[in-house]
Image (cartoon, rainbow, N blue to C red):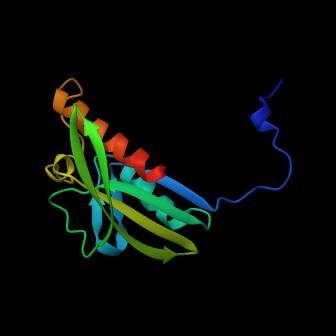
Amino acid sequence: ATFPNIMQISGPRVEPKHVICAAIEHTIPERGVKVSAGGLGKVLDQMLREHPQCTLSLVHPMFGDVDYGELEDFDEIRCVVDGKEQTIQVYTMQSELNGIKRVWYILKHEVFTEKVKTAPYPPSMTKVRTLRYFSLWNQATAALIR
């Protein structure tokens, strides 16, 4: 059998120095924050504990029924959704566990804060409001990665 070239990696494993993870579902264990609709929340919990040592940047929307505790102002992001300029406030917090520096970037906008932690996703993928939600989320996340 011929294996794809990716399977024939030679040399020592290179450990990541900085990893970015953007997810609508999220957890901040030291603050008691858990936004979950299924299994992704459990995966994120495990990643926060067991990821190789590095800086782990986590990008998440802010939900209206969640107490995030005190957050630090970080930045403002502007993007255009459906022809209208939108402003997203970005907050941050940090912690460290097992050599993993964890930096959270929490995105605040009314489209996100009207959602609740038990139902983090818009209800229908065919509604214009849902398209606006994901447009805002994707543009804000991309702006942070730049």
Residue located at (36% from left, 41% from top)? 138
Q: Where is residue 117 in the image (x, y as percent from the top left)?
A: 21, 54
Give the image quarter of residue 86: top left
Q: Where is residue 5 in the image (x, y as percent from the top left)?
A: 79, 32
Q: Residue furthest right?
A: 11
Would you say 43 lies left or right of 121 here?
right
Q: Position of residue 110 (x, y in %)?
A: 16, 50
User: How many marks on residues?
Assistant: 0
Q: Nearer the viewer, residue 78 or 90?
A: 78
Residue located at (29% from left, 52% from top)? 36
Q: Where is residue 12 in the image (x, y as percent from the top left)?
A: 82, 56
Give the image quarter of residue 14: bottom right
Q: Which of 140 and 79 is in front in this view?
A: 79
12 versus 128 height, above or below: below
Q: Nearer the viewer, residue 47 or 16?
A: 16
Residue located at (29% from left, 72% from top)? 71
Residue located at (36% from left, 68% from top)? 92
Quadrant placement of the N terminus:
top right
27 versus 81 height, above or below: below
17 versus 115 height, above or below: below
Would you say 51 lies left or right of 94 here?
right
Would you say 44 lies left or right of 11 here?
left
130 versus 21 height, above or below: above
Q: Which of 117 and 23 is in front in this view?
A: 23
